[in-house]
Amino acid sequence: MSFHFYLYRAGEGLPPINSWAELLAEPLGSLEQIRNELSELFPQIQWQLGSHAWHGFGAGYPAQSPYLDILLSEDAPGQCHFVVLNKAPPSVMRKIMEHMKLNYVCAPEAGDLVDPYAYGDDDPYYAKRAADSRES
């Protein structure tokens, strides 16, 4: 099971991100824009600036709130291309994807595309999404 899930928007038919020769994800906006969007979606999130990235976290408070562990960094000057989730339940992935109109989830440690609509929060393993045979 992967611990990191990269959520992003890109053209259909692409393989997992770890097989790309170049960055193919669309820019999602600035770090500030993405932080603000995620804070509106999850009001309990708290942000902390690290050396090169923003880390957002929220650990089930209030009790109905989901576990959140989010990393945002610039992939190009002024632009964030990925919302990176650590150990995320698929319900959190789906909520972010629908709100931000994202169409991919990748588990790069395993080289898998993930289908967060094909499994539930109580399932021990993620569901794989079939990759297109097109090379990047």
Image (tube, rainbow, N blue to C red):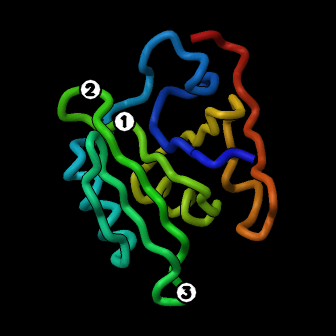
Q: Secondary structure at mark 2?
A: loop
Based on the displayed image, in which of its 4 quarters is residue 109 positioned? top right
For residue 106, which numbered disc appears in the image? none
Tag 3: residue type?
A: Gln
Residue for badge 2: 76
Q: Residue furthest front?
A: 51
Q: Secondary structure at mark 1?
A: loop
Labels 2 & 1 near each other (Cβ < 8 A)? yes
Based on the displayed image, in which of its 4 quarters is residue 82 positioned? top left
Q: Residue at x 32, y 40 (%)?
A: 73
Residue for badge 1: 81
Q: Secondary structure at mark 3?
A: loop
- Above or below for 59 versus 28: below
Based on the displayed image, in which of its 4 quarters is residue 105 positioned? top right
Tag 1: residue type?
A: His
Q: Earlier in the sequence, mark 2 or mark 1?
A: 2
Image location of residue 63, percent across then percent down: 54, 89
Tag 2: residue type?
A: Ala
For residue 64, which numbered disc appears in the image? 3
Q: Is residue 74 left or right of residue 41?
A: left
Q: Residue at x 58, y 22 (%)?
A: 18
Q: Earlier in the sequence, mark 3 or mark 2?
A: 3
Image location of residue 76, percent across then percent down: 26, 26
